[in-house]
């Protein structure tokens, strides 16, 4: 009886069992995988997701926490990275029946066609997609298919992986690797950017166009405000500026003023934290137009009168030095028509002021109104002639200037 209980609950890393769902299903066998060069540098949880297709990520994380996954015979965390020749123990799992799809195969096919038409750069190693707003980069949390799932369906013979992510409501340049070796190289460059964010230029030059509330008076400004990305409010992730947060660096530059109503900015990211631009802009007192999470509700309603129906944030360019081919890869995507139309509307209404304009943010209060310099030290009073006042000793009256010129 105890033995049967052990098999059902999967107690212990070597039990050879995983929790059985109530609806049953087929159980895979335990196996070991020798990882090759293509997997080197990837995280263990990413490798497991590839080796266990269809298994939810929550279940993969559960296997890792229980110690059922072993790398070279030792327990391992999901964040650990593998190397060429590592031996990975893949525990048995019960394949659950797939959840009911929220969209039809026809809808997925339509999304794949839409994304294929949005490819703006393609070579033997990379795809760059001009991602539409409203499309998630991957499935999950009620989204059955995103960019990567749709492209894999359109190109089943290829190995496609996301190099980085964009928020669902953000449009613009999205990198897709066609080879795992390319993914590994680009991820190493992104990690170097994060680790050396405050030391110099980044290997990736990622630039965004963003419309913010009010007149930006900070000029060209580099904002270094650490972000906490692990805060949950009502079960939803919320990012906040906090001293104990992760390093986050953004550079803002004015592109166009629309009076006191709005400012179009170009933002260069030196790190890639979740919601980084939106949180830094709000912290500076200039929330992003159309941002329902960190923005100004009254201002968003005002911008709807100018035709804005989405978050005004667009990844308009990305460039980097390819580490393997030693060539510059540079791709840009123009503003989508719906955002360009908003700019046209604002051009004739730039003198308006934002509705419900709030006080300047933390950064604005600090940078727009710099502290006054300390008062100058009191100087010794000077005489009318510009000399120090007499100190009590005898002094001669000033001599009249000679009418003759200077001696030669």
Image (cartoon, rainbow, N blue to C red):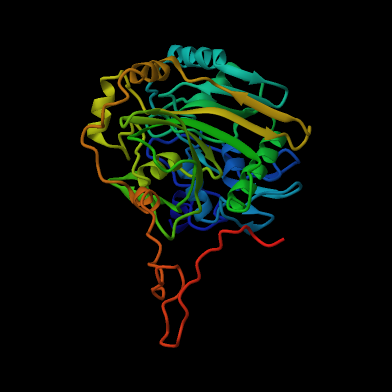
Apparent side of residue 72 relative to residue 28 in the rendered image (left or right):
right
Q: Residue 18, position in %: x, y?
A: 49, 47
Q: Residue 354, position in %: x, y?
A: 26, 32
Apparent side of residue 324 relative to residue 206 in the rendered image (left or right):
right
Q: Residue 28, position in %: x, y?
A: 56, 38
Q: Residue 341, position in %: x, y?
A: 38, 15
Regarding residue 56, the answer to whether it shows in the image is: yes
Residue found at x 47% / y 38%: 56
Residue found at x 43% / y 33%: 140
Vertical order, 90 against 181 (above or below): below
In front of the other: 159 or 218? 218
Residue found at x 67% / y 34%: 320
Residue found at x 46% / y 41%: 219
In front of the other: 2 or 76? 76
Regarding residue 90, the answer to whether it shows in the image is: no
Vertical order, 203 against 397 (above or below): above
Quadrant into which the N terminus falls: bottom left
Quadrant into which the C terminus falls: bottom right
Apparent side of residue 324 relative to residue 176 in the rendered image (left or right):
right
- Extreme bottom residue here? 393
Quadrant in the rendering for residue 318: top right
Query: In the rendered picture of this protein, how many numbered marks are placed on residues?
Result: 0
- Extreme front residue here? 404
Quadrant in the rendering for residue 258: top left
In front of the other: 379 or 240? 379
- Extreme right residue here? 325
């Amino acid at each position: 009886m105890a033995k049967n209980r052990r098999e059902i609950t999967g107690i212990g890393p070597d039990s050879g069992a995983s929790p059985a769902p109530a609806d049953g299903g087929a159980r895979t066998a335990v196996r070991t995988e020798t990882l090759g060069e293509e997997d080197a540098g990837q995280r263990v949880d990413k490798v497991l997701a590839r080796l266990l297709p269809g298994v939810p990520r929550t279940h993969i994380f559960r296997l890792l926490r229980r110690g059922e996954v072993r790398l070279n015979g030792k327990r391992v965390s999901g964040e650990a990275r593998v190397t060429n020749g590592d031996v990975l123990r893949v525990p048995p799992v019960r394949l659950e029946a797939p959840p009911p799809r929220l969209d039809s195969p026809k809808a997925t096919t339509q999304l794949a066609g839409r994304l294929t038409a949005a490819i703006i750069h393609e070579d033997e190693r990379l795809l760059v997609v001009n991602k539409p707003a409203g499309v998630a980069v991957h499935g999950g949390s009620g989204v059955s298919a995103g960019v990567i799932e749709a492209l894999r369906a359109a190109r089943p013979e290829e190995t496609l992986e996301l190099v980085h992510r964009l928020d669902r409501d953000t449009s613009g340049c999205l990198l897709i690797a066609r080879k795992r070796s390319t993914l590994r190289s680009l991820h190493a460059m992104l990690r170097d950017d994060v680790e050396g964010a405050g030391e110099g230029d980044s290997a990736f030059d990622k630039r965004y166009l963003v419309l913010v509330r009010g007149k930006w008076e900070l000029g060209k400004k580099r904002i270094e405000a650490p972000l906490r990305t692990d805060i949950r409010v009502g079960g939803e992730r919320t990012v906040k500026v906090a001293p104990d947060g992760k390093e986050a660096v953004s550079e803002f530059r004015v592109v166009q003023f629309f009076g006191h109503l709005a400012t179009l900015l170009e933002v260069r990211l030196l790190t890639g934290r979740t919601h980084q631009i939106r949180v830094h802009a709000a912290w500076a007192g200039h929330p992003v137009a159309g941002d329902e999470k960190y923005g100004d509700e009254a201002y968003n309603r005002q911008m709807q009168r100018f035709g804005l129906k989405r978050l005004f944030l667009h990844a308009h360019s990305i460039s980097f030095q390819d580490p393997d081919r030693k060539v510059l890869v540079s791709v840009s995507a123009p503003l989508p028509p719906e955002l360009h139309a908003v700019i046209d509307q604002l051009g004739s209404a730039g003198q308006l002021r934002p509705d419900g304009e709030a006080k300047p943010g933390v950064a604005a209060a600090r940078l727009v109104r710099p502290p006054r310099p300390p008062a100058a030290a009191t100087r010794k009073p000077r005489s009318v002639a510009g000399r120090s006042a007499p100190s009590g000793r005898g002094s001669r009256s000033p001599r009249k200037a000679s009418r003759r010129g200077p001696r030669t």
